Image (cartoon, helix red, strand yellow):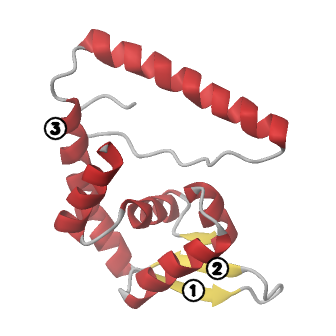
Amino acid sequence: MVLRQADSHLHRAADLSVIQFVVLSGLSSKGGSMTATEIARLTGTGPNNITMVLSRMRRKGLITTNRSRPDRRFLRVQLTDEGKAVLSGAMTAAWEFVNATMDSLTETDMTSMEKVLATIGRNVKKSDESSGRRSPTYHPPPSPKRRQF
């Protein structure tokens, strides 16, 4: 339910889906360039789905894609100036959504939630390690108004 609301909020504010927002944020945090495989891992998305997401983003002018010269199997994805501008507006909208969603939580609630989410994160990582999968490594930028989760 929260993800659906976040997706709706981002669509209205920046014409982005949550996954597109994560892709732009990930690219920005990695210096503006990643491979499609890295992006798929970051978003927890399969190769076919991430190809469709990247195609839509390329048509919007948010990213460019190029095949790697040494190994044509790798698709290099780069953030465009338009993508940076859209991300800037989307980041503001995302933090507005987070702040509105978390507004009524007390410090005690926040501390409890942080502990629960940290435990869940450790469990997911442990599960991924035992199955040989790699966990996504996306870390959102800190909020300008609230403490980082």
Q: What residue is shown at x 44% (from left), y 62% (from top)? A: 19
Res 145 visible: no
Q: Nearer the viewer, mark 2 or mark 3?
A: 3
Residue 97 image offset from top left, x and y in percent: 21, 46
Q: Residue at x 69, y 68 (%)?
A: 37
Name the N-terminal-most of marks 2 and 3: 2
* Residue holding disc 3: 100
Pointers 2 and 1 in contact (C-beta within 8 Å): yes
Numbered disc 2: secondary structure = strand
Quarter residue 40 falls in: bottom right
Residue located beneath label 1 in the image? 65
Residue 105, how many percent across, how many down? 22, 20
Residue 131 on image: x %, y %? 82, 41
Q: Which residue is mark 2?
A: 76
* Amino acid type, label 3: Ala
Mark 1: few/some/many CA within 10 Å (<14, 14-19, 20+): some
Label 1 vs 3, first from the N-terminus: 1
Which residue is at 23% across, 30% downward? Answer: 102
Residue at left offset 51%, top offset 69%? 32
| SS under mark 3 | helix
